[in-house]
Image: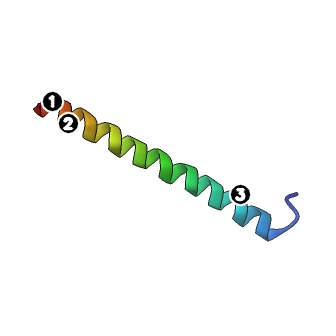
Amino acid sequence: TKEFPVERLWRDAKLYEIGAGTSEIRRMLIGRELFAETS
């Protein structure tokens, strides 16, 4: 439910976790592309 502040904190924490994962994946893909170009 959205009645409790802890629910909002939990939801926000999950969104940050997802956001962090996508930026890590993006970094990995960029690194892979750069490596492929130099090889």
| Contact check, label 2 and label 3, Cβ < 8 Å | no
Judging by the rendered image, the residue that carries numbered circle 1 is: 37
Identify which amino acid the numbered label 1 is placed on.
Answer: Glu
Q: Residue 4 falls in which quadrant of the image?
A: bottom right
Judging by the rendered image, the residue that carries numbered circle 2 is: 34
Q: Mark 3 or mark 2, which is nearer the start of the sequence? A: 3
On screen, residue 26 versus residue 17, left or right, reads left
How crowded pointer 3 is (Cα within 10 Å; few <14, some 14-19, many 20+) is rated as few
| Contact check, label 1 and label 2, Cβ < 8 Å | yes
Of 39 and 21, the residue lying toward us: 39
Residue drawn at point x = 41 percent, y = 43 percent: 25
Q: Residue furthest left?
A: 38
Identify which amino acid the numbered label 2 is placed on.
Answer: Leu
Judging by the rendered image, the residue that carries numbered circle 3 is: 11
| Contact check, label 3 and label 1, Cβ < 8 Å | no
Q: CA distance from mark 1 to mark 2?
A: 5 Å
Identify which amino acid the numbered label 3 is placed on.
Answer: Arg
Residue drawn at point x = 29 percent, y = 38 percent: 30
